[in-house]
Image (cartoon, grey):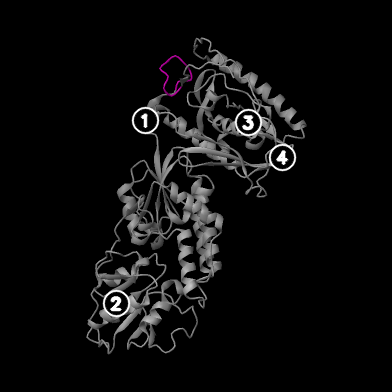
């Protein structure tokens, strides 16, 4: 295609009278288009479906989100990205039947503040102006680009009359839209699926389906102007009624901290990294309402927001759940999603960075709320993909276990978490085993050690070995049972026996209460999975020897010896060595 010759262009300042005339014409055109669309049986909104989710990719388009280096444009670009998040959610997963027309505006609907749209960049009359819903042309450009690649029939398309450098307009692959009479419409002889997501840097759009066999259309665009457009955010034409005062946006941008259950390590991290412009979202103000599990430090933020109703419902449901099992895990995931959804409404377009607790991460990611933002993850557990591999390994060692195979998360959720963790800027955790999974992103912070406790002198007649967990396979109870077999010790259990009532038959056992530290000679936790090693830290701080598997994440903590996960011989040797120092146990 030969290049369209550029014509000289004299920029004139827009006037209020011109804006009034433009608005009047737009209203008339919008009314006429509404009527014609209602009368067209091929124009309809298409629902999300899954029949084509594994079909071949017909076409794809990826365009950068942050495209302007001028800091005065930053707030408009952030508004554009916020609008693209909303549009991507409305497009992602829809499937269009063969012969049916896809209409951009029928699918998206009108953009307004009431529907969550923000002021973004809109190209109008040669200028980039702030407009509610502005920036959606990046989505329509990508749709048109993919439709051309796929060989779809283009029913309606309008090219921009001015090219923004770096956009698809430079490749004649652009399609401008303006509610509702400037639309983008196309159709295919075969059904197709649209997938649309935002990652940290790009809008990514894909079509899936069966190749229609059509020809790629060759289109001629209108005569265009390629000189750089003025922007209301940086224009120095002081007499223009559209000029935006940049002084109101010099400190644009904030971080949001999305928290759930309290941990002292992450509370310290939040205190050290927050700024006075940042936003805090938490279930409830635990310090105010004396709920220690939500006792986050709330000072030092610009605003603090609570999800009281969601938290109240979760608390009620949690009390009715069993302590273990698949049903509990499914319900917990559902409640995490509800909390994440309540937080998402507070992620306004000026939130450019997010610090999010891990249990909320996959839901925010799969629903598109983290797209175009940087984010750090407060890692409270192993990634679900790694966790399930670990449980599968443990189950292969102990097929008789009643707990190691009782729950696996939905694959879609596991994939969402994996993708989100890959896109995260930083993975923050005090857990040494989790940090090792992320050698490039991981930031290992210190465990907050409890206040020292000095138990009274023990009067045990034989060593007391404390197992500080429930008797479930993932806590290493099978390994501990074999390691202790034949040793003259008293085993103190700090949790229920779930693997079977006769699990510890033949052993001298007792149930430990609040005073377990006073009688403990040794604490042992050979877990496959342990995310909250608080009792191990407490024992080590009290000067009690501790043996823990590497999976407990306490490498380097003074007073704790770590052993390989699932290695019974190493565990037994470590126990015998530790007990020999008590004076109550003779090495055979």
Q: Find disc 2 in the rendering and name its residue.
A: 574
| Cα–Cα span, label 1 and label 2 | 60 Å
The residue labelled by disc 1 is: 250
223 with respect to 275 (left or right): right
On the rendered structure, is 489 left or right of 3? left
Mark nearer the N terminus (4 vs 1): 4
Query: Tag 2 or tag 4, which sits nearer the N-term?
Result: 4
Q: Which residue is mark 4?
A: 190
Residues packed near mark 2 inside 10 Å, few (<14), some (14 to 19) or many (20 plus): some
Mark 1 or 3: the one toward you: 3
Graded by Cα atoms within 10 Å as few (under 14), some (14 to 19) or many (20 or more), the crowding at tag 1 reads few
The quarter of the picture where residue 20 lies is top right
Return the disc, 3 or 2, that comes first in the chain's sequence: 3
The crowding category of the residue bearing disc 3, from other C-alpha atoms within 10 Å (few below 14, some 14 to 19, many at least 20), is many
Asked if marks 4 and 2 touch (Cβ < 8 Å), the reply is no
Residue nearest the observer in this picture, 39 or 244: 39
Query: Which of disc 3 and disc 1 is earlier in sequence?
Result: 3
């Amino acid at each position: 295609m030969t290049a369209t010759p550029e014509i000289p262009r004299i920029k004139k300042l827009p006037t209020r009278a011109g804006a009034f005339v433009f608005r009047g014409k737009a209203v008339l055109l919008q009314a006429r288009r509404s009527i014609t669309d209602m009368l067209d049986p091929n124009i309809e909104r298409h629902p999300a479906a899954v029949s084509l989710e594994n079909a071949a990719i017909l076409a794809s388009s990826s365009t950068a989100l942050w495209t302007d280096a001028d800091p005065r444009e930053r707030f408009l670009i952030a508004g554009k990205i916020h609008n693209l998040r909303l549009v991507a959610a409305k497009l992602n997963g829809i499937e269009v039947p063969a012969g049916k027309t896809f209409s951009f505006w029928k699918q998206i609907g009108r953009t307004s503040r009431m529907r969550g749209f923000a002021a973004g960049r809109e190209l109008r009359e040669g200028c980039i102006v702030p407009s509610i819903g502005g920036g959606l042309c990046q989505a329509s450009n990508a749709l048109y680009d993919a439709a051309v690649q796929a060989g779809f029939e283009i029913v309606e398309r309008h090219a921009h009359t001015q090219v923004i450098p770096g956009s698809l307009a430079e490749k004649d692959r652009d399609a401008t839209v303006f509610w509702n009479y400037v639309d983008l419409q196309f159709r295919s002889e075969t059904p197709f699926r649209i997938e649309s997501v935002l990652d940290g840097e790009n809008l990514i759009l894909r079509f899936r389906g069966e190749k229609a066999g059509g020809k790629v259309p060759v289109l001629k665009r209108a005569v265009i102007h390629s000189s750089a457009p003025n922007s209301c955010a940086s224009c120095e034409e002081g007499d223009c009624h559209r000029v935006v005062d940049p002084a109101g946006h010099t400190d644009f941008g904030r971080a949001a901290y999305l928290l759930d259950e309290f941990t002292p390590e992450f509370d310290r991290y939040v205190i050290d990294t927050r700024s006075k412009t940042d936003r805090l979202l938490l279930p409830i103000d635990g310090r105010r309402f004396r709920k220690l599990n939500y006792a986050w430090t709330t000072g030092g933020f610009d605003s603090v927001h609570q999800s009281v109703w969601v938290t109240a419902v979760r608390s009620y449901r949690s009390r009715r759940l069993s302590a273990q099992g698949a049903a509990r895990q499914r319900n917990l995931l559902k409640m995490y999603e509800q909390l994440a959804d309540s937080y998402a409404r507070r992620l306004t377009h000026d939130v450019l960075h997010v610090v999010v607790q891990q249990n909320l991460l996959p839901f925010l990611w799969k629903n598109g709320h983290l797209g175009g933002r940087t984010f750090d993850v407060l890692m409270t557990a192993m990634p679900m993909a790694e966790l399930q591999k670990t449980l599968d390994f443990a189950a292969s060692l102990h097929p008789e276990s009643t707990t190691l195979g009782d729950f696996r998360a939905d694959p879609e959720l596991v994939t969402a978490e994996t993708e989100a963790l890959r896109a995260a800027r930083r993975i923050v955790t005090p857990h040494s085993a989790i940090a090792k999974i992320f050698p490039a992103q991981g930031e290992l912070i210190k465990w907050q050690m409890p206040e020292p406790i000095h138990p009274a002198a023990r009067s045990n007649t034989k060593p007391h070995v404390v197992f500080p967990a429930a008797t479930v396979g993932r806590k290493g109870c099978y390994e501990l049972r074999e390691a202790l077999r034949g040793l003259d010790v008293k085993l103190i259990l700090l949790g229920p026996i779930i693997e079977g009532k006769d699990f510890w038959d033949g052993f001298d056992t007792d149930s430990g209460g609040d005073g377990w530290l006073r009688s403990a000679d040794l604490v042992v936790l050979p877990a496959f999975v342990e995310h909250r090693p608080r009792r191990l830290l407490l024992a080590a701080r009290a000067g009690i020897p501790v043996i823990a598997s590497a999976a407990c994440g306490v490498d380097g903590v003074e007073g704790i010896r770590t052993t390989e996960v699932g290695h019974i011989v190493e565990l037994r040797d470590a126990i015998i060595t530790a007990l020999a120092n008590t004076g109550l146990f003779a090495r055979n």
